[in-house]
Image: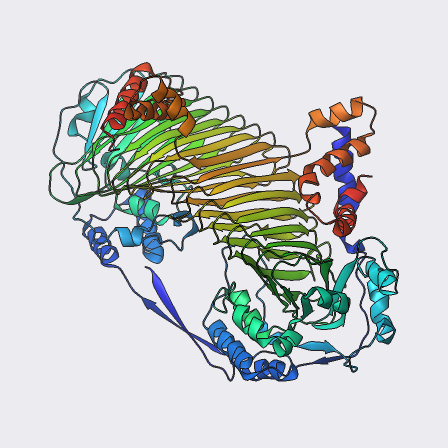
């Protein structure tokens, strides 16, 4: 009893204002005027030297967006967003492409240093060959990729890893073929907006039969004041290939809410596998929930080929509002989708996240493990859809979503949609909501652990299933973030 | 009613011009006319009913765009609204059986001899003289925002008011039989209010019979004072209703207990919706049911259990067997309000799909605002276990027998919680009949 009370007190005492990544880097930036209209869309397209088909693609999306209404079915509340009061394009002051890290703005490097990981790879970049795991980083500073490393080695394997704006020029046939094929421009309000104004993002293509020699990673960072960030990521794993992609985010503290509407599209062809991991730690707002990031993301993977596999892993600790449903379309026969999630909310954060597993092919299987931890005055919702098409014979799903509540002013909600149109489909769903069990605490303490250690052990155990899914490089940072969000207060 | 908003946006100044056009479906228009033809209610009840209709008019018939109606589109299901069946035909009332013919209560309720502590009146006799307190009991806040509940409140001119006095324990089951009064197309609306005093007990069997051209909207509202308990059973017999929205609302006081079971079989579109609120501490609710769906049936069970006080307990267990082109829906929501600590909630929905055209939609929700609770839900969907079938067939059972045995075992788990033996054996017979006549 005492231990739990202590945990609650300590969690409460973690001042969310003490967000340790809240700092602003001062770099002159080049931005489009405030507001959104066709001219802005054309401006963005022109700035990026895009071919005409892409400009038209954007304009079509913009026109479509005008006819759409902002969705209101999710369990999040926020003041109305004034889309005309945002900047839709901002690029760091352009110097002609940095040749090496030395050429990169030292302010930028300093910022990455504050972030700690994974630009720790600077050591590797500096030439420490074979220094353990290697990670290629496509660093996104605001909206433009500034540094792309390891390109050469990846090139040897035939892997294309570059900013999408570059891919449009160097590999137009691939971009044209796959862009918008998983998340069409008409998909939803935020995805459509993204299609119209997306600034940059990563493009990955793994050729047939290639196992990507290293973990690929993008580091997002929202920096410019009042900048909406509209990332667009496209990953294609050709037949028999494998890639693991890491995405991590931290953002500086600021007063006004920032809109973030990214789109991620994954395509796995026959026998290919994509593993996509996210650690998200954007500014969650102050104690009263003021100023945090609005995160409206559309992530979707398409298991297009037979026996393909897409696995999403996410650790969500930041943002004032999270609206995010990484999904898998299990189109290929015997394809597999996985979703592992830890969502931690504290302060006034609102999380409405989950997944969609759409079983279309035969013998498809999926697994969903979601762990929600709500503390402070936050609301944490799991919303997931499992769907079996009439032709999805022997589709198989297992879903487990557990919620842990710390404090009596937070809320944990579970909203699964389980839709079965095939008799041979076998779907199982289980969910629990509870606080840390007194019995478990008692048991652990009886064996000599202090109250803090016992609580830490239990919280750790609660999320372990998901942590284990993270690549080594990320697991460290994820644990660190969980510590910052909650566990650090426990010991 | 349902509105279509045409939004026109101009590029230059981004002004939004919204043109709101009302488009009523023919059923909505017909319902408006039916309502207009009803005698205007008087007093507090009259005001509540007028308000309810205004609410219905604003929202119209529910569509898939309403989250709570995601899988049942009432607006497209009700192509037209049948004429109101107001047949105040009198019928003899035997024992503890009360027939509601086309929603109308019998005339001779007052002359009946009821067990001590039980009082039964026709709703039409109560409405006129109802004060604010009674009106608030007849038309509680719970579920009031649901369009079909509002429509029921507005249109129900009759039904029953059943009162069980403090401490009275009525052991004999009371059967309330909803029946159609004739064979012509008809829509009937009725509402039954059941008031239980402290420590009172009642067993109520809600039985529905209807021919194929019946559109029914029935509501039953329970108020349980401290320590009161209710055994409730919902059962359709000779039931072919084209569409039926059956609402159950229960408000539980301290230590009150509500135990409900529903057998669902037959008919076209059935939407059962339950709104239960544990307002007092240590209230205990249980909702269980078996759905046996075949043909083109669509049965939707949607329930909301709202724990507003500490130490509550709720259990839900639903078994669905879906075959042919039928579709089943289960939406269950357990809400635990802030400070409703030590709540213990468990919800389970299990489905066997027996044909490739059958569909099942499950949405078990938890909405929890208190930290010291234990709540869980589980949902499974699958087909009959091939190994179990093989085992039984290897022992000489035909495929049909083996299937029937497994299905019986699957469903029986929920029926076992019905405590009244006579009622339970009647339910078991109905279930076996269905299983035996099941098209394979």
Return the x and y of residue A339 as percentages of the image width and height.
Answer: 59, 48
Q: Quadrant of the N terminus of chain A?
A: top right
Question: Which of A225/A232 is in front?
Answer: A232
Q: Quadrant of residue B115 in the image?
A: top left
Q: Quadrant of residue B318 in the image?
A: top left
Q: Which residue does the image show at 56% across and 53% down from the upper left?
A: A271
Residue A253, visible in the rendered structure: no
Q: Give the side of residue B322 with respect to residue B334, left or right.
A: left
Return the x and y of residue A161 as percentages of the image width and height.
Answer: 69, 67
Q: Which residue does the image show at 12% across and 30% down from the upper left?
A: B90
Question: Which of A252/A117 is in front?
Answer: A117
Q: Give the side of residue A196 with respect to residue A227, left or right.
A: left
Q: How many numbered circles does the render carry?
A: 0
Q: Which residue does the image show at 76% across and 69% down from the upper left?
A: A152
Q: Give the side of residue A199 with respect to residue A113, left or right.
A: left
Q: Quadrant of the C terminus of chain A?
A: top right
Where A313 sits versus A229, above or below? above
Where A466 sits versus A196, above or below? above
Return the x and y of residue A119 as percentages of the image width and height.
Answer: 81, 61
Q: Give the side of residue B82 with respect to residue A137, left or right.
A: left
Question: Which of A171/B426 is in front?
Answer: A171
The colour mode here is rainbow
Return the x and y of residue B159 as percentages of the image width and height.
Answer: 25, 35
Residue B59, visible in the rendered structure: yes
């Amino acid at each position: 009893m005492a231990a739990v009370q202590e945990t609650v007190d300590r969690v409460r005492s973690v001042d969310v204002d003490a967000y340790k990544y809240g700092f602003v880097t001062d770099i002159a930036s080049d931005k489009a005027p405030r507001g959104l209209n066709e001219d802005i869309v054309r401006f963005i397209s022109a700035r990026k030297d895009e071919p005409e088909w892409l400009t038209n693609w954007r304009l079509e999306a913009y026109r479509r967006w005008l006819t759409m209404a902002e969705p209101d079915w999710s369990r999040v509340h926020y003041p109305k967003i004034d889309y005309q009061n945002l900047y839709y394009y901002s690029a760091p002051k352009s110097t002609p492409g940095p040749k090496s890290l030395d050429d990169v703005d030292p302010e930028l490097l300093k910022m990455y240093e504050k972030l700690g990981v994974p630009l720790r790879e600077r050591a590797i970049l500096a030439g420490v060959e074979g220094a353990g795991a290697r990670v290629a980083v496509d660093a996104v500073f605001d909206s433009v990729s500034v540094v792309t490393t390891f390109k050469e080695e990846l090139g040897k394997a035939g892997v294309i890893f570059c900013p999408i704006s570059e891919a449009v020029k160097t590999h137009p046939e691939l971009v044209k073929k796959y862009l918008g094929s998983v998340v069409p421009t008409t998909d939803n309000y935020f995805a459509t907006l993204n299609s119209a104004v997306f600034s940059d993002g990563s493009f990955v293509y793994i050729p047939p039969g290639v196992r990507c020699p290293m973990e690929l990673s993008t580091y997002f960072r929202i920096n410019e004041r009042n900048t909406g960030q509209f990332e667009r990521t496209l990953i294609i794993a050709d037949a028999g290939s494998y890639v693991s992609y890491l995405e991590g985010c931290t953002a500086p503290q600021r007063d006004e809410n920032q809109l973030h509407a990214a789109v991620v599209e994954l395509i796995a062809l026959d026998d290919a596998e994509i593993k996509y991991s996210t650690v998200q730690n954007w500014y969650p707002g102050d104690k009263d929930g003021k100023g945090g990031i609005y995160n409206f993301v559309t992530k979707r993977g398409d298991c297009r080929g037979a026996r393909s596999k897409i696995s999403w892993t996410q650790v969500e600790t930041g943002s004032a509002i999270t609206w995010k449903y990484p999904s898998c379309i299990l189109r290929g026969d015997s394809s597999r989708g996985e979703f592992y999630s830890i969502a931690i909310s504290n302060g006034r954060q609102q999380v409405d996240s989950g997944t969609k597993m759409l079983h279309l092919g035969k013998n498809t299987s999926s697994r969903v493990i979601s762990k929600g931890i709500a503390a402070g005055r936050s609301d944490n919702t799991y919303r997931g859809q499992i769907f079996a098409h009439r032709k999805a014979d022997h589709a198989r799903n297992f879903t487990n979503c557990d919620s842990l509540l710390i404090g009596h002013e937070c809320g944990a909600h579970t909203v699964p949609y389980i839709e079965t149109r095939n008799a041979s489909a076998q779907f199982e769903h289980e969910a629990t909501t509870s606080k840390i069990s007194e019995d478990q605490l008692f048991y652990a303490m009886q064996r000599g652990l202090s109250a803090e250690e016992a609580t830490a052990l239990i919280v750790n155990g609660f999320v372990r299933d998901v942590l284990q899914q993270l690549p080594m490089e990320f697991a460290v940072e994820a644990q660190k973030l969980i510590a910052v969000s909650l566990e650090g207060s426990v010991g | 009613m349902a509105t279509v908003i045409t939004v026109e946006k101009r590029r230059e100044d981004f002004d939004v011009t919204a043109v709101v056009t009302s488009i009523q479906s023919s059923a909505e228009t017909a319902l408006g006319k039916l309502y207009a033809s009803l005698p205007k209610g008087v007093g507090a009840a009259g005001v509540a009913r007028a308000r309810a209709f205004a609410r219905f008019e604003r929202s119209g018939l529910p569509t898939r765009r309403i989250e709570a109606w995601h899988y049942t589109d009432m607006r497209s299901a009700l192509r037209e609204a049948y004429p109101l069946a107001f047949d105040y035909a009198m019928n003899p009332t035997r024992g503890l059986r009360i027939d509601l013919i086309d929603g109308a209560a019998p005339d001779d309720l007052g002359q009946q001899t009821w067990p001590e502590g039980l009082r039964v009146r026709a709703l039409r006799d109560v409405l006129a003289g109802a004060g604010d307190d009674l009106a608030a009991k007849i038309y509680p806040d719970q579920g009031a925002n649901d369009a079909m509940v509002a429509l029921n409140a507005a249109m129900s001119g009759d039904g029953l008011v059943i009162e069980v006095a403090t401490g009275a324990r009525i052991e004999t089951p009371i059967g309330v039989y909803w029946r159609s009064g004739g064979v012509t197309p008809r829509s009937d609306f009725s509402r039954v209010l059941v008031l239980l005093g402290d420590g009172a007990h009642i067993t109520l069997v809600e039985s529905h019979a209807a021919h194929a051209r019946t559109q029914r909207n029935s509501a039953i509202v329970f108020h349980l004072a401290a320590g009161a308990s209710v055994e409730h059973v919902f059962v359709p017999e000779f039931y072919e209703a084209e569409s039926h929205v059956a609402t159950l609302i229960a408000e539980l006081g301290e230590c009150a207990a509500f135990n409900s079971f529903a057998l669902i079989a037959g008919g076209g579109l059935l939407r059962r919706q339950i709104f239960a609120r544990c307002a007092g501490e240590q209230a205990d609710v249980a909702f269980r049911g078996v759905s046996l769906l075949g043909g083109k049936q669509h049965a939707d069970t949607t329930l909301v259990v709202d724990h507003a006080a500490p130490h509550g307990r709720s259990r839900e267990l639903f078994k669905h067997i879906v075959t042919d082109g039928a579709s089943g829906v289960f939406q269950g929501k357990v809400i635990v309000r802030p400070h409703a600590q030590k709540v213990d909630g468990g919800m389970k929905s299990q489905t066997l799909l027996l044909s490739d055209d059958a569909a099942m939609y499950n949405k078990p929700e938890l909405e929890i605002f208190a930290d010291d609770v234990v709540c869980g839900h589980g949902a499974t969907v699958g087909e009959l276990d091939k190994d179990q079938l093989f085992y039984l067939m290897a022992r000489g059972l035909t495929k049909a027998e083996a299937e029937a045995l497994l299905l019986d075992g699957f469903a029986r788990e929920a029926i076992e919680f019905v405590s009244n033996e006579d009622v339970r054996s009647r339910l078991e017979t109905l279930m076996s009949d269905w299983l035996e006549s099941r098209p394979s």
